[in-house]
Image: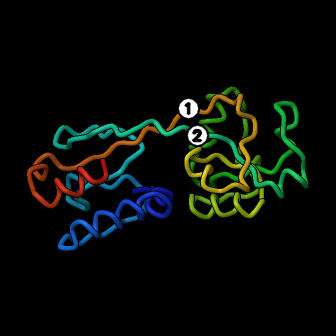
C-alpha cells in the first residue's frame, strides 16, 4: 500500500484484523511503487491504479475525494489563497515524481518543479509538512478531517478523486487466509 495508506489508514483496520485473526501474520510494505503481484512480491496490493494484468483480480473500493489544505497557522501568516493569489503561496509537492505537475496541467495551470516551495517524494513527509504549516498541499479529505487544524482552501479547484483498488493474484483468491485479509481490507 502507499505510504499514506500504510501509515494513516491501514493501522486501525489491521488492528481489528489481528484481534479477530491473531494466527495471520502480516507484512506491510509501505511503498508508492506499484509492486508486481505476478512475481509474488506481495499477495495483496492496495493501489491507486487499476491493474492491467489478466492474472490479477481487482476490486474497486472507492473514489477518495481529494482537497487542497493548509494549516490554520499558515493561513494566519499568509492569508487564504484565491485563484488570483494562489501562485504567491508556498506549495508542497513532489521532487522527482511528475504526478502533481500533470495534475496541475490537466486543471489548466502550467507549473514546473520550482513552483513548489518544498519538494519531497515521500507522501508522509509532505503530509506532516502540511500539518506543520509549511504550505498548501493536496490530500485526502477523509484524512484531513481528522485534524481540526487543517482547513480546506480553494474548494472550487477541480481535483479528481483518487481511485482505490484492492488487487491480488488470481491463483491466491481461494487461499483462506488471503481471502480473510482481502475481505477485511475491502
Tell me residue 127's x, y (percent). Answer: 63, 58
Relative horizontal placement of residue 56, taking residue 132 as reference (left or right) = left
Q: Where 56 falls versus 19 (above or below)? A: above
Q: Residue drawn at (28%, 63%), measured in percent from left and top?
A: 17
Tell me residue 99's x, y (percent). Answer: 56, 43
Tell me residue 113's x, y (percent). Answer: 70, 48
Q: Residue drawn at (37%, 52%), measured in percent from left and top?
A: 34
Q: Residue drawn at (42%, 44%), measured in percent from left and top?
A: 48
* Distance CA(mark 1)–CA(mark 2): 7 Å
The answer to the question of whether label 1 and label 2 lie on touching residues, with beta carbons closer than 8 A, is yes
Which residue is nearer to you in this view: 91 or 184?
184
Relative horizontal placement of residue 30, taking residue 51 as reference (left or right) = right
Helix, strand, or loop for circle 2?
A: strand
Helix, strand, or loop for circle 1?
A: loop
Q: Residue drawn at (22%, 73%), measured in percent from left and top?
A: 22
Tell me residue 124's x, y (percent). Answer: 57, 62
Q: Quadrant of the N terminus?
A: bottom left
Which residue is nearer to you in this view: 151 or 37?
151
The residue wearing badge 2 is 66
Q: Residues within 10 Å of mark 1 (few under 14, many from 20)?
A: some
Quadrant location of residue 122?
bottom right
Which residue is nearer to you in this view: 46 or 155?
155
The disc label shown at residue 160, or none: 1
Q: Residues within 10 Å of mark 2 (few under 14, many from 20)?
A: many
What is the basis of the colouring in this image?
rainbow
Amino acid at each position: 500500500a502507499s505510504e499514506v495508506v500504510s501509515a494513516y489508514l491501514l493501522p486501525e483496520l489491521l488492528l481489528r484484523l489481528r484481534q479477530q485473526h491473531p494466527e495471520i501474520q502480516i507484512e506491510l510494505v509501505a511503498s508508492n511503487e506499484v509492486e508486481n503481484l505476478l512475481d509474488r512480491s506481495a499477495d495483496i496490493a492496495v493501489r491507486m491504479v487499476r491493474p492491467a494484468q489478466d492474472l490479477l483480480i481487482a476490486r474497486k473500493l472507492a473514489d477518495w475525494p481529494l482537497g487542497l489544505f493548509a494549516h490554520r497557522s499558515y493561513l494566519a501568516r499568509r492569508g487564504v489563497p484565491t485563484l488570483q493569489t494562489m501562485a504567491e503561496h508556498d506549495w508542497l509537492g513532489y521532487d522527482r515524481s511528475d504526478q502533481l505537475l500533470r495534475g496541475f496541467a490537466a486543471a489548466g495551470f502550467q507549473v514546473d518543479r520550482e513552483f513548489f516551495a518544498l519538494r519531497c517524494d515521500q507522501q508522509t513527509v509532505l503530509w506532516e509538512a502540511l500539518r506543520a504549516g509549511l504550505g498548501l498541499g493536496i490530500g485526502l479529505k477523509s484524512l484531513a478531517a481528522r485534524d481540526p487544524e487543517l482547513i480546506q482552501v480553494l474548494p472550487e479547484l477541480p481535483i479528481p478523486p483518487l481511485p482505490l483498488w484492492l488487487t491480488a493474484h488470481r491463483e491466491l483468491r481461494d487461499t483462506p487466509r488471503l481471502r480473510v485479509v482481502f475481505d477485511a481490507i475491502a
